[in-house]
Amino acid sequence: MKTLTLFTLLILITLLASSISINDHIFLNVDCNSVAGKIKPFAEINCGPLPIRWIKGAELTEQYKQIGIHFIRTHDFYGPTDISSIFPDWNRSADDPESYNFTESDKVIESIAANTFAVFYRLGESASDREELRQPPPNFTKWAEVCKHIVMHYNDGWANGYHYNITYWEIWNEPDLRGFWNGTAEQYYRLYEITARTLKEYNSSLKVGGPAVAYILNENYTVGFLEYVTKNNVPLDFFSWHLYASHPSELYEASLYVRRILDEFGLYDCENILTEWNINIISPQRDKDNAKNAAFTACSLIAFQDAGLDYAFRYRGTQDNDWLARLLGLDLSLFTYDGKFKMPALSYLAMHYMMETPLRISIAPYNISEGITYLAGISSDGSNISLLIANYEGGEKTCEINFTNIPWNDGVLLHYLIDDTHHLEIVEKKNAGKNFSYSFSLKKNSVHFIRLTNTSYFPPEGPEPAKIPFILRLRFLDPVLRFLAFLLLMAVFG
């Protein structure tokens, strides 16, 4: 009996050791013949490429193109594209071209469309402390007519306008926050209905949607809104929502939830669009600009592939260079005001490199709650194979990759790294063959881009990012600054 007990104990110890070994490792089998679908870039963003109008900053067209941005939402330009700026006098006629001032808005829209970016037009107002801009419009029908004439100006040349064929039109922004809407949910439903019907009657090919809800668990703007539009047969081509998350799993689960409730209401063709997202707003500024947010960003972009999501507009591209906002941790930009990369922008660059191998290779599923995600792809001609791996706040692992059925015999592996000391830099280069294995240490808050190729082209390393100022690296200030940021957000947005 004692012998049996000792033998059992030895078996348990062996199994435990094996479990620890497995838990400390990630084993990935990348079979280049196992292609399933295509990779989505999720390269959408709020604002830019022009700098915020009161800042003498850099124009970001080249940076946006470098990281693959293709779709820009017109929110928080702070004047341009806002209804109150375009139609400043409510007593004027909505049909009279002289009632409109498109000057500043034209500059913004032209900078987007003329540089081959698509426009996602938010109809409403930027964040503001002007109380009158938070009130429901005094006449919903007239407001809808103003929106229609904005469509006419940018799509059909009205009032010395353009022919940009802007498809997506979002009605209002965050009506569940008093910083944007001081009316009731029912008033928003009615405004949405009148505007959506007006735009679709003018041009049925337009895609209209909303409500750009800030909090998807607020049923007034999810279930209540969907009940209203389905009961009254109101057009809804896309449902839009926002989330600033502490972990990528929150974004993933939220997107699945939105897709599920849309399907429950029979809205199978309604697009699921995340029109604002980023890391938690009240996290310290350094964690918005450093490798932690780079890992958060890459982990999220990978997770979005399986989240039932159509587009994800990062908030935001441009920076207003407000030192108080930065001190309080409220600067969410990908680039500095003078055009320098921040670390999270490098994750977009890595994803842009992934799109050179757009055919998705099926690999083992991951557990998003652990903060480690991965994505593999191959080019249509088989000459390039890519792997993107991100670790957000997860434990350190040894990642072991076995590549099989590589469609060539002799090539090169390049390993690029983003962490606190590397800005998408090549840390290893080695020869690769038809069946090939590779391993590396996957550390907390790091992003790894791996390219196998039999060509002479190697993706360029990332630019050196902006330095994080010393004062923003002082952790003992975090509790006070977080509290002040929370108070400010509550005062402005409710």
Image: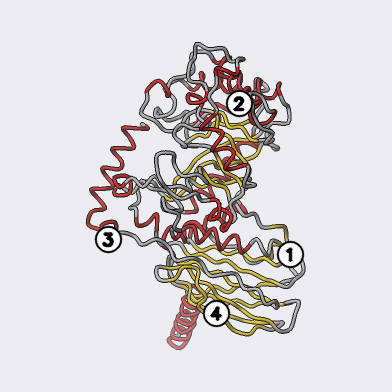
Asked whether residue 309 is in view, the answer is: no
Q: Which amino acid does label 2 sit on?
A: Ile
Percent of width and height locating residue 311 = 60, 45
Q: Which of 37 and 201 is in front in this view?
A: 201
- Mark nearest the camera among 3 and 4 is 3
Percent of width and height locating residue 90 = 49, 14
Instruction: Report which residue position mark 4 lands on.
Output: 439
Kindly identify the residue that appears in the image at 56 percent across and 57 percent down.
67
- Mark nearest the camera among 3 and 1 is 3
Question: Which is more N-terminal, label 2 or label 4?
Answer: 2
- Mark nearest the camera among 4 and 2 is 2
Question: Which is more N-terminal, label 1 or label 4?
Answer: 1
Instruction: Report which residue position mark 2 lands on.
Output: 150
Kindly identify the residue that appears in the image at 67 percent across and 34 percent down.
267
Question: Which is more N-terminal, label 4 or label 3?
Answer: 4
Percent of width and height locating residue 388 = 57, 66
